[in-house]
Image: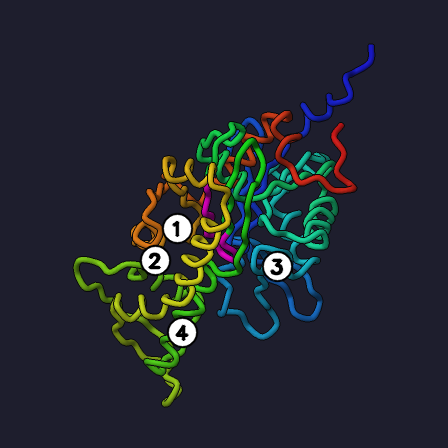
Amino acid sequence: MGFPSDIFGWFSSDLAIDLGTASTLVYVKGKGIVLKEPSVVAVERNTQEVLAVGTEAKRMLGRTPGNIIAVRPMKEGVIADFDMAEQMLKRFILKAHNRSMFVRPRIIIGVPSRITQVEQRAVRDSAELAGAREVYLIEEPVAAAIGVGLPITEPCGNMVVDIGGGTTDIAVISLGGIVYSESVKVAGDRMDDAIMNYVKKKRNLLIGEHMAERIKFEIGSAYPFEERKTMIIKGRDLISGIPRTLVVDDAEIREALQEPIGAIVNAVKAALETTPPELAGDIIDQGIVLTGGGSLLKGIDIRLREETNLPIITVEDPLISVVLGVGKILDDLNLLAKVSIMSQSNTYR
């Protein structure tokens, strides 16, 4: 008796991956989200041997001795270091499958909406080299829309703004496809850089990525708070060269974040200006769905509401919208055929 051709699909645990600039999330068919770790790899400088990935490697960022370097293989939503991305994916796939090497899963990966053919090829190749049997790519705003439960296959316009670590993806989706999309390389990382630069210029203090990220989460905002908030920060004095602490407040950090937030707001406005009138009417009724880790910045929904005069819908856990959407697509192969990015090497079986 012959087995159906897809019998191996039952034995291999298919994966959905949100391969992000800041963090990577992995969803295993039938199990849900099994991994959520920073997209960081720690390597030995001379031998290029991988020492750690994910959380363990992120702890090493900025704290490594001369012979160890911590690398972020993803930059602005795409692969910047091909070898490291492949190594990182390999480790994450092994971790998700409890280290069983013989499994060759089907993998669906969320990618930025304006990804080029060359960048698509890099993602596909690194996943195949990491052990994937088949690789499909889904645009992140479509995945996020599915993840938050929007009716994307219906003939009405849904607008999604996905603020990640490296890119902000804006898309208007109708009938399962993207009607308009824009991807700007301004997101969480650019906010951290803006805070680091501001503290350096205005307060003569050199701070690291970890500190900048903490400041953003604790007192960063896109809209004024009702009460002033302060935070003690630590770094190295630019003049004396010795470590010191100082106090910053939310108004200073809002000033630091003015440029990246302004760029995101302008991109959303530009998207609204180019949306077809019928779909624009739907967006007035439905509102704009805000997702991605960057949407956790306090007051960004209020700022967008004031700038666009539209309802802004925030989701419960914006960090997992994309991976949940990719996971739902994994369970529905008909939907996969409708929404995946087709390319020469992408054939449905």
SS class, disc 4: loop
Do callouts 1 and 3 mark residues in contact (Cβ within 8 Å)?
no
Q: Magenta stretch containing residue 166, yes or no? A: yes
* Residue at mark 4: 207
Q: Is the residue 343 above or below the residue 152 in the image?
A: below
For the residue labelled by badge 1, is the local secondary structure a helix, a strand or a loop?
helix
Residue 243 visible, this angle: yes
In the rendered structure, find residue 295 and report the number of the disc placed on it: 1
CA gap between label 2 and label 1 equals 11 Å
Q: Which mark is residue 244?
A: none
Camera-side residue: 3 or 224? Answer: 224
Residue 310 vertical placement versus 238 (above, below): above
**Amino acid at the residue labelled 1:** Ser
Cα distance in 3D space between marks 4 and 2: 15 Å
Location of residue 87 in the rendering, given as x and y in whole percent from the top left corner: 67, 53
Q: Earlier in the sequence, mark 2 or mark 1?
A: 2
Residue that mark 3 sits on? 73
Q: Which residues are magenta?
A: 159-168
SS type, badge 3: loop
For the N terminus, which image quadrant?
A: top right
Q: Position of residue 43 (x, y in %)?
A: 63, 63
Tell me the kind of residue under disc 2.
Phe
Q: Badge 4: few (under 14), some or many (20 or more) residues near its Cα, within 10 Å?
A: some
As measured in the structure, the alpha-carbon distance from the residue carrying label 1 to the one carrying label 3 is: 23 Å
Dot 1 or dot 4: first in sequence order is 4
Amino acid beneath label 4: Ile
Q: Nearer the viewer, mark 2 or mark 1?
A: 1
Look at the image and tell me whether residue 55 can be seen: no
Question: Is residue 140 magenta-colored?
Answer: no
Residue that numbered label 2 is attached to = 217
